[in-house]
Amino acid sequence: MKNLMEYKGYLGSVNYNDEDEIFYGRIEYIRSLISYEGHDVESLKNSFHEAVEDYLELARNQNIEPEQPFKGSFNIRTGSDLHRRAAIAAKQRGINLNRLVNEAIEQYLKSFA
């Protein structure tokens, strides 16, 4: 993955600030703002891992469920014409709109593999 690190299912961004000569990032795809930084690749990676561990420990200590990226559902806004065309296409194929969208996304992502 370009400009992303992964640890325990969490994805962290990788950025560089030339003025301060520091790498930095944040845990992506969750609402909580959790950031980290390092002076080199190894320290950035260690800082990211520590940030994830600290977040999970905080959630445990507060007896709350930590946010999980990619819950498996998301809302899209297509506009009424595309929504109509997709719903009709799904009906004609004998599937629901959710399955049509899933198949379309799978097909689209195969073009990048």
Image: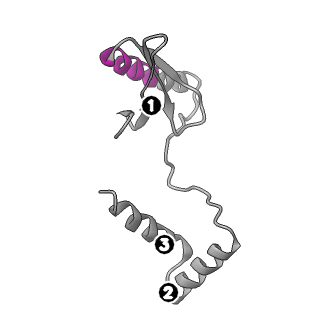
SS at mark 3 in the image: helix
Can you tell which mark lies on residue 99? Answer: 3
The quadrant of the image that shows the N terminus is top left
In the rendering, at what x and y percent does residue 50 appear? 41, 18
In the rendered image, the residue lying farthest to the bottom is 92
Q: Residue at x 65, y 62 (%)?
A: 77
Q: Which residue type carries mark 1?
A: Ser
Which amino acid lies under the numbered mark 3 shown in the image of this protein?
Arg
Q: Which mark is residue 13?
A: 1
How crowded is the residue under tag 3: few (<14 C-alpha within 10 Å), some, or many (20+)? few
Distance from disc 2 to disc 1, alpha carbons, whole Å, reads 41 Å
Q: What number of labels is visible?
A: 3
Could you tell which of marks 2 and 3 lies nearer the N-terminus?
2
Closer to the camera: disc 2 or disc 1? 1
Q: Which stretch is magenta? A: 41-54
Q: Mark 2 = which residue?
A: 94
Q: Amino acid at mark 2?
A: Gly
Above or below, comparing residue 3 to residue 74 in the picture: above
CB atoms of marks 3 and 1 within 8 Å: no
Label 2 and label 3: CA atoms lie apart by 10 Å
